[in-house]
Image (spheres, rainbow, N blue to C red):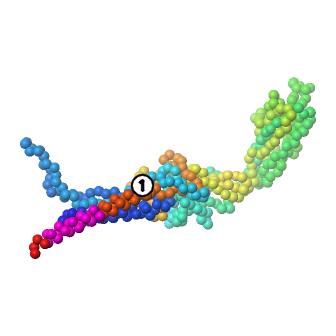
Amino acid sequence: MLRSLYSGISGLRSHQAMLDVTGNNIANVNTTGFKSSAAQFQDTLSQLTSGAGAPQGEVGGTNPAQIGLGVQVAGIATNFSQGSSQATGKSTDLLISGDGLFITQKGGETFYTRAGSFDFDSAGRLVTADGSIVQGWGAQNGVVSDGGPTSNITLPVGAIVGATASENAAFQGNLPSDVADGTELKRDFVVFDELGASSTVTLTFTRDFDPAALPAATDGWTVTDPASGSSVYLQSDAGTFSVQNSAADPTEAIFRVKGNTVTIDLSALEGYANLSTVAGTATDGNAAGTLNSYTLSADGTLVGLFSNGEQLAIGRIALANFVNPGGLEKAGGSSYRATFNSGAPTVGTAGSAGLGTLSSGALEMSNVDLSQEFTNLIVAQRGFQANARIITTSDEVLQELTNLKR
């Protein structure tokens, strides 16, 4: 039988594979996180009809004569270039800008995907559209210990953050220098105890100017907590103050407030005339609170927003990268699984070395280039037609041979 007949058959098969790959790319033009593929051809083993001859004396060398036996698909390569972004406004939709893949688990098997269309299920777990659970690291008391084994990212619905006692406060504004000696200014601020109960603390600022004091005249204010009876003296110096009788820093005063030690920062106070704007607030401490909502930061940290105003890290989404991402095996559902040729995954935090950053409220679309794919359709179709002509021509030659004997 003619070799060209089988060459034509191999061409039909290879171009059919190219049509299949191109058709799949076009079908997934709107698939989130889809990466297009391309068929790569190579020739098959060639039959040697005469070998090469070395040059000898007056005779030149000759090249080998070979007849090819057709074409075959060498491989189907996946293009991992970045797809365009599409804003969705949904906080659980995530886009990877740069390299990296999300890590998911389903049925005990680990998968990797670029499709960041996530949501929380009834158990509070962050999942993909097909139910695969997104992997990352959990947080303990607001601190994420990344770098270890990954686990399910879970939103602790109904979580409670405990109360903390107030330990610091601050006053700012102006204490008027032109008021009469003995003038009192009362200012309130709120503190919390260990159980989260709030209470109002009143500090009394009393103008204290004694020109007869020794060794020098005193010009300032006495700050008193009527509840505990403790007080400090603020010495005025050209519009600024320093704490004279405190064991703390010269800009701080320590009071016993509601059984707790509260350090009050007085460094921002000023003492100019005709202005009374002094005010204070606790800078820490809070009541207990429940989880109200959450946000996702650029490094994949899930931050819980609690009813008491606290913001604590709940977990962090992990990303994986591969030495050869083209070696990943497509597993369906816009997911991949690792293979021997992809290498082992390198797991890390978004934004770290070799990994892209995350954007919330957007998705990565397919990277299929329709103009290129339709061109590939034409090339594959013409290649298929040309190889079909090889078969019909070979058939006509065989027919002529059978007609030699009538």
Q: How many callouts does the rendering have?
A: 1
Whether 147 is drawn above or below 204: the answer is: below
Is 116 on the left or on the right of 283, as rendered? left
Residue of label 1: 79
Is residue 91 something one can see in this rendering? Answer: yes
Horizontal placement of 248 versus 79: left or right? right
Q: For this rendering, which residue is in front, 365 or 56?
A: 365
Q: Residue at x 52, y 63 (%)?
A: 132
Quadrant where the image shows the C terminus: bottom left
Q: Is residue 238 above or below residue 116?
A: above
Q: Quadrant of the N terminus?
A: bottom left
Give the side of residue 68 with respect to residue 291, left or right. Answer: left
Q: Main secondary structure of the magenta part?
A: helix
Q: Is residue 55 left or right of residue 218?
A: left
Q: Is residue 267 above or below residue 215?
A: below
Which residue is at the front of the view, 27 or 266? 27
Give the camera-side residue of 45 and 85. Answer: 85
Question: In the image, is residue 7 part of the stretch drawn in magenta?
Answer: no
Q: Position of residue 253 (x, y in %)?
A: 79, 38
Q: Dot 1 lies on which element?
A: loop
Residue 148 in view (yes/no): no
In x, y percent, where is residue 211? 91, 26
- Image coords of residue 141 (percent x, y): 65, 53
Q: Is residue 401 magenta?
A: yes
Q: Which residues are magenta?
A: 385-402
Depth check: give the residue in front, 33 or 278: 33
Q: Residue at x 77, y 33 (%)?
A: 250
Q: Position of residue 135 (x, y in %)?
A: 54, 58
Q: Amino acid at mark 1?
A: Asn
